Image (cartoon, rainbow, N blue to C red):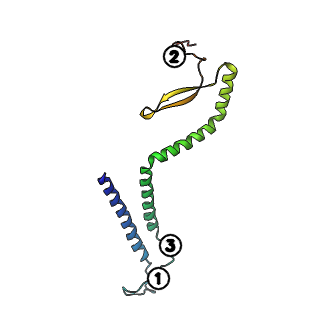
Amino acid sequence: MPKLIKRKAVAVVAIVALCMVAAIFTANAQPFDPNTAVYTSQNSIDTTNRGRAPEPSTIALMLSGFIAALVRFARRRFDEFKRGFDIVVSIVGLIVSFPILLISILILKVTSHGPALFRQTRVGMNGYFFDIFKLRTMVVNAESQTGPVWARENDP
């Protein structure tokens, strides 16, 4: 674990250093015009570039640092992002499939007696039990005498 923390710290320091170097070089960058060249001493402050937009390379470097930080955050929070994504996709899927599900339930109610949906217990990750609701595709109480069996030819 300390090795991982050390790598992250080195990466953050490298990104900050690159951003600082880019800012230093682009802050002093000016197109050279020999007619208006002004030589200043090291103690004076050049204010001719104030208010100018930064160089594209500076913006790209800063954005790459921001994107890298975002990726690191996403990697640390992958489970939360995945859970949120799964919930959003599930809700959209339910909304899209609702009319088809409603028509299927109506057809099942008209063509056979019994409930259109039934509950089945499943086992998930780490032995966690959960209930799933399914459309009934068999006759009511089909496995009450035999228990679960595989489908076969001409299965009633």
Q: Quadrant of residue 108?
A: top right
Kind of residue at badge 3: Ala
- Residue 37 image offset from top left, x and y in percent: 43, 86
Tag 3, which secondary structure?
loop
- Residue 112 image offset from top left, x and y in percent: 66, 18
- Residue 2 image offset from top left, x and y in percent: 30, 54
Q: Earlier in the sequence, mark 3 or mark 1?
A: 1
Q: Which mark is residue 154?
A: none
Tag 2, which secondary structure?
loop
Q: Quadrant of residue 10?
A: bottom left
Q: Can you tell which of label 3 and label 2 is closer to the viewer?
A: 2
Q: Farthest residue toward the left?
A: 3
Kind of residue at badge 1: Thr
Kind of residue at badge 2: Ala
Q: Is residue 114 above or below residue 33?
A: above
Q: The C terminus appears in which quarter of the rendering?
A: top right
What residue is shown with label 1?
47
Q: Is residue 32 above or below residue 97?
A: below
Q: Is residue 151 left or right of residue 24?
A: right
The residues bearing labels 3 and 2 have C-alpha atoms spaced at a distance of 71 Å
The residues bearing labels 2 and 1 have C-alpha atoms spaced at a distance of 84 Å
Name the residue at 67% across, 34% down.
99
Q: Is residue 82 left or right of residue 134?
A: left
Mark 3 neighbour density, 10 Å: few (under 14) some (14–19) many (20 or more): few
Q: Is residue 142 above or below residue 135?
A: above
What residue is shown with label 2?
151
Q: Earlier in the sequence, mark 3 or mark 2?
A: 3
- Residue 130 image offset from top left, x and y in percent: 51, 31
The residues bearing labels 3 and 1 have C-alpha atoms spaced at a distance of 14 Å
